[in-house]
Image (cartoon, rainbow, N blue to C red):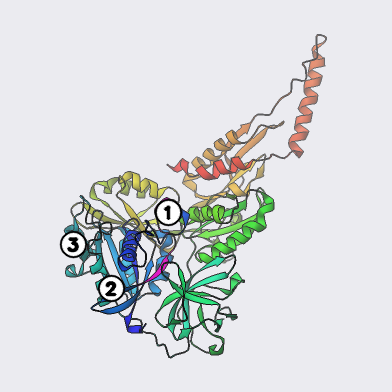
Amino acid sequence: MRIDRIRNFCIIAHIDHGKSTLADRLLLLTGAITPREFREQILDDMELERERGITIKSSAVNFRFSLDDVEYSLNLIDTPGHVDFSYEVSRSLTACEGAILLVDASQGVEAQTIANAYQAQNCELAIIPVISKIDLPSAHPDEVTREMEHLLGVVADEVLLVSAKTGEGVEEVLRAVIERVPAPSGRPDRPPRALIFDSVFDEYRGVITYVRMADGRLKPGDEILMLQAQAEYEVTELGRFRPRMTPLDELVAGEVGYVIANIKVLADVKIGDTVTLASSADVQPLRGYKEPQAMVFCGFFPADRYDVNDLRGALEKLALNDCSFTFEPETSDALGFGFQCGFLGLLHMEITRARLEREGAVEVVQTAPTVTYEIRTRTGDVLQVRSPSEVPDAGDIEEFREPIVRVSFVLPAASIGPLMKLCENRRGKYVRTEYLSTTRVVLVYDLPFGEIVFDFYDRLKSLTRGYGTMDYDFVGYEPADLVKLDILVATRPVDALSSIVHRDKAYHKGRFIVRKLRKEIDRHLFEVPIQAAIGSNVIARETIAPLRKNVTAKCYGGDVTRKRKLLERQKAGKKRMKQVGRVSIPQEAFLAVLGTADEETK
C-alpha cells in the first residue's frame, strides 16, 4: 500500500459517549467483520471491559475503504474515556495523524471531552468533530454544536452527525477521515524505525509488541534491536490487526501492526522504545512518551504468604501491558512480604486488582490507598512519601506538603450550590465558573488530591443526579497540617492500617477504625486494647474484653478466701499472658477496615 493512501486515526471522547459502538459500526461497514461475527464492543477483548461496559486498554485495527475508486488502508485505535486511563489516550495520539472527537448528542461536552481535545491539539492532530447518538429522543445536536464551538473552537460546518447504532452518517465519517487526516510522513527507503506503543505477553510466543512504523520496512527474519534496552532479537512474525492478528510479509513506513520475536525477557520491552535493525544501531531514536506519574499508592500482599512469587510474576506481566502501573517490594509486620504499587487513580487501582485476581489467579490483600506527599525535614532534605510507614518522626518534620489538583467539573447549573459546598468541605479553593449554556456550567476548583481520591466521584454523581463529570490535572505540592495516624493493637502498631490524614479529621477517622476493629477481632484470653494515636498521643480507644473461665465453678462451700485465691491466680496469669501474648488479626479484619476506611468522611 502506498504511504499516501494510509490513514492513522483514533477515536477520543468522554466515557460512555459511544467510542466502541462507532468503532464496531466502522468495522461492519468496511467489511473487516461480517454480520455473523459482529458483537457489541468487539474491540474490547478484556472480560472486565465487557462486564463494566468501558474501554480500559487501547485497541488497534486495520481495515480498507474505497473512495472514488481508490482503496485506502485505515488504522483505527479505539481509546478509553475515563480520566484514570488518559495515559492510554496519550500513547494512541502519538501513533496517529488525526482524531475523531466524539460528543454525545444528549449529554453534550463533558470534562474528559475537553481534556482529550486539548491533548489532541497539543499533538497537532487533525480533529474531526462528530456528534453521536442523534437517534435518541433526548438528542439536541444544535445546542451541542454551539457548546463545541464555544469550548473547543471547532467550526460548526465541519461537525458531522452520526448514529452508530443505526449506521446513519457513519460513511461520511470515513470520507472525512480520508479527506481531512493527512497521510503519514515516513519514508520507506530509510533504515527502519518503529515506535512501541503497547505490548502484551503470550505464554507460547513471548512478548507481542504493538508498533507504529515511522520509516523503512520490517520483514520476518530481520535481526532487530531495541534501542533503549540494547537487546537483539529475530523477527518470527509480523502483521496487522484485522481485527484479529493477521500475518504479513512486511510492515512499511506509516503502518500500524504487531511484531513477534520470541522475546522472553519482559524488561527488554519498554513502551516508547524504538525498534530498528541490528545493523542500523546508529539511527536517531524516535521521541517516546513522557513517563506517567503515579498518583495513588497502596500495598498488594498475597492472601497466602507462600504465593508471593506468583504475585510477583503476575505483576511483571501486568506492568508489561500497562506501563502506567508501577510496583516495588515492601514488607509489613502484619501482612508479610508484598509490593507497593502505584496507579494513576482509584479506578485504575480497582481494575488492576481485578486483573491480577483473574489473569494472574492470585488472591490479593490490599492496604488502604494513599497519595504521594512531600516532607521537608529539619535538615533541609525533601522526601517523597508514598506510604505512612515512610513518614519520619514528627520532631524531624519541618513541613508536610500534599498534592493539589485542578479539577474541572461539568454539571447542571442547578447543582452548583451543593457541589461548591462539597468542595469547601474538602478544603478546596475556588478558581472560576464558566457557563456553557443557561443549564450547564463548568466549575473549576483546586483541591487536595487526597480529598478526592476516595469517595468524591460518588458524591459528585449523587449531588448532580448522575449528570456531573470531572477531570483533573496535577498542579503541585502545598503545605498542609497533616499527621500520621497510627493504629495500635495490644500496644503494637499495625503498619498496614496507618494512614496520613489532615489533623482536623484525625479523631473521626481514628474513632471509626478502632470501632470497626473491635467488631472484627476475636476475643482473646487477655484484654486487648485498640488505639488510634498521633505520635505518642492516643486520640481514640476501644477495648476487647477477655474470655474468662469460671475457675471457682468446682469450689463448693468453705471459706471465701479459697475463691479469692483462685481468682488472684487467674488474674496474675492473664497479666503474664498480656505481656507475652500476641493478638492475631484475621485477614477478614483487614479487608473490612481497609475496604470501608473512607466511610467516616461521608
Q: Quadrant of residue 382?
A: bottom right
Would you say 124 lies left or right of 60 here? left
Locate the C terminus and report the quarter of the image it occupies. top left
Q: Secondary structure at mark 2?
A: helix
Amino acid type, label 1: Arg
- Mark closer to the chain start, 1 or 3: 1
Q: Quadrant of residue 566?
A: top right
Q: Residue at x 33, y 54 (%)?
A: 469
Where residue 146 is drawn, which disc sits there?
3
- Is 129 positioned to the left or the right of 274 in the image? left
Q: Residue at x 35, y 48 (%)?
A: 460
Q: Nearer the viewer, residue 213 or 304?
A: 213
SS under mark 3: helix
The residue nearer to you, when weighing 282 against 262, is 262
Magenta part of the protein: which range?
Answer: 49-63
532 up-or-down from 91: above or below = above
Instruction: Give amino acid for label 3.
Output: Arg
Whole-number angstrom distance, CA of label 2 to CA of label 1: 28 Å
Please tell me whether residue 46 is drawn above or below residue 70 in the rendered image. Answer: above
Mark 3 surroundings: few (<14), some (14-19) or many (≥20) residues within 10 A: some
Instruction: Identify the image quadrant of residue 447.
Output: bottom left
Identity of the residue drawn at 75% across and 30% down: 574
- Whether residue 468 is visible, yes or no, is yes
Asked if residue 60 lies in the magenta stretch, the reply is: yes
Residue carrying label 2: 177
Question: Marks 1 and 3: which is nearer the front?
Answer: 1
In the rendered structure, which disc, 2 or 3, sits on the residue that comes first in sequence? 3
In the rendered image, residue 234, in percent from the top left (x then y), is placed at 58, 80
Q: Which mark is residue 50?
A: 1
Question: Quarter of the image containing the N terminus?
Answer: bottom left
Mark 1–mark 3 Cα distance, whole angstroms, equals: 33 Å
**Coordinates of residue 107 in the picture (x, y in percent):** 26, 54
